[in-house]
Image (cartoon, rainbow, N blue to C red):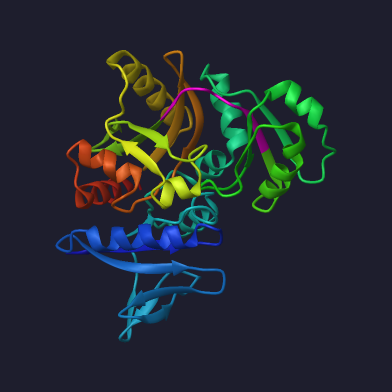
Amino acid sequence: MQKNIAIIMGGYSSEVEISLKSGNVVYESLNREIYRPYKVHILQDRWVVVQDEIEYPIQKNDFTFVLENEKITFDCVFNAIHGNPGENGVILAYFDLLGIPHTSAPFYQMALTFNKRDTLSVVKEYGIKAATSYYLNEGDEIDTGEIIRKVGLPCFVKPNNAGSSFGISKVYKEIDLLLAIRKACKEDSEILIESFLDGAEISVGVLEYEGKVKVLPMTEIVSENDFFDYEAKYLGASQEITPARISEEVRRKVEIVAKKVYEILNISGFSRAEYIIVNGEPYFLEINTVPGLTKESILPQQAAEAGISLPDLFGNIIEEALKSN
C-alpha cells in the first residue's frame, strides 16, 4: 500500500522560491510504487495542497485535507522548507505534537543548527576548529575598531539566522563595516562577524543512510565571485567540483570532523556543512539541515557520485524517519 507523503515547501523567508524548486524535485523523484506524494505549500497567507493547479486547504488542527470528499492523512512529512519555519524547527514541533513523522532532526536540533552563533558555541566545546567570531544584536552600540581588532580584515558579516547567503558581505575596510551590518540586519536582528579563513572551501553532505551515518563524497567550491554568495550558489557563478581536489589525508580528516559534528549536534536526516581547509586542517563554518535538493544542488551531486539516485536518496530518508518514529 502506498504511503501518503506531504512534501512541505515554500516557507516564510527569502528562500521561498528555492524551497519550491527543491520540493518539486522531491515530488517528481519519489517512487510512485511506494509513495503517494503531495505538494504542500506552507506560505504566510495559506497552507495548501497543490494538485493539478488546484489548491486544497490544509486543516491545521490535524494537518489533513479533503480530496474528492475523502479526508487525506499523511504517513510522513518530507521537509523541503529552507529557512523559517522548516529549517529552524518551528513547524517540526507542530508535527511532533501531532505525532506525524518527518524527515528532519528533532525541532530543538533544527533550531540550534539554524542559529549559527549557538552552533559554533557547541562545536567549539568539542574541539572543532572555527573562525574567530564577534556577535552583535540589532541596536547594540557598534565599535568598529573593537570588532576589527578581534576578527581582523577582511572579515565576513552574516545574518545569524538566514540561509542561501542572503545578507552576507565580505568587508575589506573598516569604513565599510557599518554598511555590511545594516545589510545583514535586513535579514536578521542577530549578527555574526567572522575572521576570513584563507583556504579551499569544501562542502560535505552527511546523512543517515540505511541505518548508518554516511559521509558523502565532498565538493570543492570555486567561486567566480569574491565568496560563495547567492549568485555563485544559484546563478552559476561558481565551480562545484565533486569529488573535491584534496589529498586522501585531508579527506580523511574532513570526514572524521564532519561525522563528529553531525553526531555532536544530534542531527538526523540530511545535512550539508561547509569547511575551509587551512594548512591541511578543516575549519567549520556552518551547517545546513535542509540543504538544496534540486538536481543541480550540492547534496544530490554528492549522492550521485556515491552511486545513490534521487529516488533512493529521498526514499531512504523517508524510511529512516518512519523507523525512528
**275 over 92 or under it: above or below:** above
Q: Is residue 196 magenta?
A: yes
Question: Residue 250 appears in which quarter of the rendering?
Answer: top left
Residue drawn at x 85%, y 38% is 141
Counting from the top left corner in percent of width and height, residue 89 is at: 52, 50
Name which quarter of the figure residue 154 lies in: top right
137 or 149, which is in the foreground?
A: 149
Q: Position of residue 96 (x, y in %)?
A: 47, 53
Residue drawn at (43%, 69%) of the image? 41
One can see residue 290 in this view: no
Name the image quarter holding residue 81.
bottom left
Q: Main secondary structure of the magenta part?
A: strand
Residue drawn at 55 percent across, 44 percent down? 111
Can I make out residue 46 in this image?
yes
Could you tell whether 148 is left or right of 261 in the image? right
Count of all numbered marks drawn on residues in the image: 0
The magenta segment is 192-201
Instruction: State the residue lying farthest toward the bottom.
Output: 69
Q: Position of residue 223 (x, y in %)?
A: 43, 38
Quarter occupied by the N terminus: bottom left
The image position of residue 305, as x and y in percent, is: 21, 37
Relative to 185, 285 lies left or right:
left
Residue 225 lies within the magenta run = no
Q: Is residue 19 left or right of residue 178?
A: left
